[in-house]
Amino acid sequence: MHNKTPLELLDMNKRWAAERLSYDSDFFTSLVNVQKPDYLWIGCSDSRVPANEIVGLKSGEMFVHRNIANVVPHSDLNCLSVIQYAVEALEVSHIIVVGHYGCGGIKAAMDQNHHGEIDNWLAHIKDIYRQNYEEISAISDRERQADRLCELNVSTQVRNVAKTSVVQKAWKNGRKLKVHGWVYGLEDGILHDLDVGVESREQLHTVFQIDTTR
């Protein structure tokens, strides 16, 4: 794979823009004043998982937040701000947490090596690993162990999204908003629904149900 220089990327951008206009002369003008996506995608920063492309959506049809291993910590103001904007300003109907098999962040969380500052971020995933250690350890294949932790991580982050005051307030106000959990297969390009979706505060433990009227 030939690594392009930044100047080459700028040239490729011009060709890309010209190609889009050749198919649709209003492609860019139609995007300038309107951003009305129905989906918020919370995914991994991995370059092999382009959000709107793998679901066949156009520019402007999906709001996207990405970080290492698609984690939604309760203290991450970046992620929480994205969720708030998506729910309250864009009024999305679906929040989709998407992990992917073969995730480097997941694998790094499973070893005892020192990875630098990212170890502090991976601690969120290590907690999930610890909580499910017996189940994961019972799997003989190391790759499959990582795949299972990937699934458990997605499930946990789905519930973390549902626990936020922004999402619970939307439900309290009668909004139809569902949080989904998917995993993407790098080997075949297929998304898998883990069936761990949450669409009401009643699906959460009473400890996490926030009274947003106060």
Image: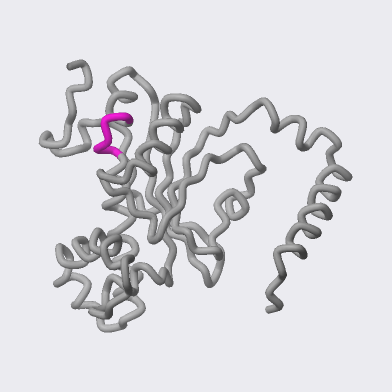
Name the spot of residue 94 as percent of width and height, x first: 44, 36
Colour scheme of the rendered structure: one colour
Q: Residue at x 42, y 29 (%)?
A: 87
Specify whether 100 is left or right of 34.
left
Q: Quadrant location of the C terminus? A: top left
Name the spot of residue 19 as percent of width and height, x first: 84, 50
Specify whether 100 is left or right of 162.
right
Which residue occupies the extreme left position in the image? 207
Tally of numbered discs: 0
Above or below, comparing residue 176 to residue 95 in the picture = above
Name the spot of residue 139 as percent of width and height, x first: 24, 78
72, 96: nearer the viewer = 72
Magenta-tinted stretch: 162-166
Q: Quadrant location of the N terminus? A: bottom right
Q: Main secondary structure of the magenta part?
A: helix
110, 200: nearer the viewer = 110
Q: Residue at x 22, y 66 (%)?
A: 126
Q: Residue at x 42, y 53 (%)?
A: 182
Q: Residue at x 44, y 58 (%)?
A: 44
**Quarter of the image holding residue 208?**
top left
Above or below, comparing residue 164 to residue 152 in the picture = above
Which residue occupies the extreme right position in the image? 22
Above or below, comparing residue 6 to residue 63 in the picture = below
| 186 inside magenta stretch | no
**Quarter of the image holding residue 36?**
top right
Name the spot of residue 156 as percent of width and height, x first: 26, 52
